[in-house]
Amino acid sequence: MIDIIVMVLFGIGLFSFFSTTVGILRFPDFYSRMHAAGKGDVFSSVAMLLGLVVYHFHHPSLDGVLVAVKILMISLFIFLASPTATHAIISAGFNSGVVPWSRQKQEEGQQ
Amino acid sequence: MHKLYSFLVLFSFWMLLSGKFDAFHLTLGVFSSLLVAFLSADLLFHDRGKSDSRRWRELRRFIAYLPWLGKEIVLSTVHVTYLALHPRMRELIEPQVMRFKTRITSEIGQVVFANSITLTPGTITIQEEGGEFIVHALNRKFADGLPGEMEERLLRVFGDEEQANG
């Protein structure tokens, strides 16, 4: 039972990491790529870390609980750090004048 | 009072990370937590003017806010996944940059607001300066949704009492 939960959580994490990567490659410009990079990351790493927490329920002990709480602290840190890093990158791009992609501009460019 | 709180936070963090509960390690922990609490409690509780009851109320309401944020994070991941794997993704998005002013006055409230905007579907905070946000949205629907519901919820957490009730 525990194994199934762990596998499902890891599967979810892997799939959203995969789609995040596809998103980074496929989105048209810098800003929308940051959408993929900044959001998919949090959910997928938290899902995988939760999988690790559940895995520790195999051998319940004080040490296991401590490790589980530490992993939860890591996910809390990711929760705070990932959006902050996204702000830092996107704000640097904005300050150096990266122009956002828009469909009209692309169509004009093609004509 | 804030020194006592910082000591408690630091000491429980010490116990969690060391994982050893014998007298020697606990004494070491007490001493180093006392020292750090004495020297740098101002960093942890940097807004000294707030009353204790106000702090507890903010903490309680902030924890009540987290499940909603979690739901939004899941929705936003689903949304990014859908867009990333959609064959004609470029026809679905209409990126735009928008500006607005928030009614949240406290600094920590604005930080939480900026991070929450980034974590919710379709929007990402570019810059925040003195309550004025610059936000990049993937299409008009998400741009119109701001500041909206999230600001209301955060005003209830970090706003003044009369603002929250009014």
Image (spheres, coloured by chain):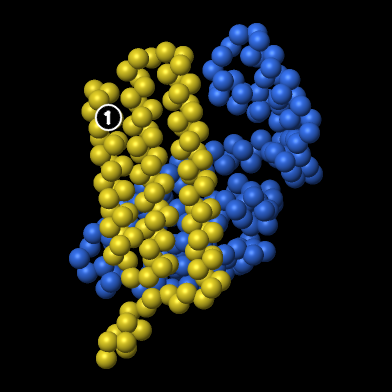
Chain colours: A yellow, B blue
Rendered image quadrant of residue B80: bottom left
In this view, B40 is above or below B93: above
In the rendered structure, the answer to whether residue A36 lies left or right of residue A7 reads right
Q: Position of residue A10 (x, y in %)?
A: 29, 37
Viewer-closest of B116 and A50: A50
The residue positioned 67% from the left and 19% from the top of the image is B29
Q: Position of residue A73 (x, y in %)?
A: 50, 33
Viewer-closest of A76 and B116: A76
For the C terminus of chain A, the image quarter is bottom left
The residue positioned 45% from the left and 41% from the top of the image is B67
In the rendered structure, the answer to whether residue B100 lies left or right of residue A44 reads right
Q: Position of residue B156 (x, y in %)?
A: 60, 49
In the rendered structure, the answer to whether residue B123 lies left or right of residue B160 reads left
Q: Which residue is mark 1?
A: A5
For residue B165, say whether it is visible.
Answer: no
Q: Position of residue A93 (x, y in %)?
A: 50, 68
